[in-house]
């Protein structure tokens, strides 16, 4: 892996998160944000990981930062909404980091 390629870190962080290794994914993405050229896509991916890990306050803060950045410069809606959207945060609240519901309310399967 190229230690200066933000994209490598982002892809590895995403892969780790999808495998349920959220702490490692968070560490990888925070490392990526320290690299030159890291931008909205990496920030959004970190927000997605934080939401999946149940760190909703931090995820919402990153979403706010992306929205604020979008007022001064272009931030792709894909980055600001698809990765750290209210949908992800809402899903994390109701479904939880396991990806399964914890209750049997409103027709959700457990």
Image (cartoon, helix red, strand yellow):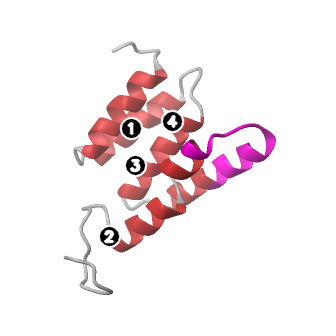
- CA–CA distance in space, label 4 to label 3: 11 Å
- CA–CA distance in space, label 4 to label 2: 24 Å
- CA–CA distance in space, label 1 to label 4: 12 Å
- Residue 65's x, y, as percent? 66, 49
Q: Which mark is residue 48?
A: none
The relative height of residue 94 versus residue 70 in the rendered view (above or below) is below
For label 3, the SS is helix
- Residue 59's x, y, as percent? 51, 55
- Residue 88's x, y, as percent? 45, 60
Q: Do the residues labelled 1 and 3 touch (CB within 8 Å)?
A: no
Q: Mark 1 against mark 4, which lies toward the viewer? A: 4
Answer left or right for 5 relative to 105. Answer: right
- CA–CA distance in space, label 2 to label 3: 14 Å
Q: Residue 27 carries which label?
A: 1
- Segment tinted magenta in the rendering: 64-78
For label 2, the SS is helix
Q: Quadrant of the N terminus?
A: top left
Badge 2 or badge 3: first in the primary sequence: 3
Q: Mark 2 against mark 3, which lies toward the viewer? A: 2
Residue picked out by circle 2: 95
């Amino acid at each position: 892996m190229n230690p200066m390629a933000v994209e490598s870190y982002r892809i590895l962080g995403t892969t780790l998160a999808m495998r349920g290794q959220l702490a490692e994914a968070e560490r990888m993405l925070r490392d990526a944000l320290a690299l030159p050229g890291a931008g909205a896509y990496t920030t959004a991916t970190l927000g997605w990981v934080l939401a999946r890990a149940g760190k909703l306050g931090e995820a919402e803060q990153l979403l706010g930062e992306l929205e604020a950045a979008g007022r001064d410069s272009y931030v792709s809606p894909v980055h600001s909404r698809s990765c750290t959207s209210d949908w992800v945060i809402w899903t994390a609240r109701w479904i939880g980091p396991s990806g399964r519901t914890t209750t049997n309310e409103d027709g959700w399967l457990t």
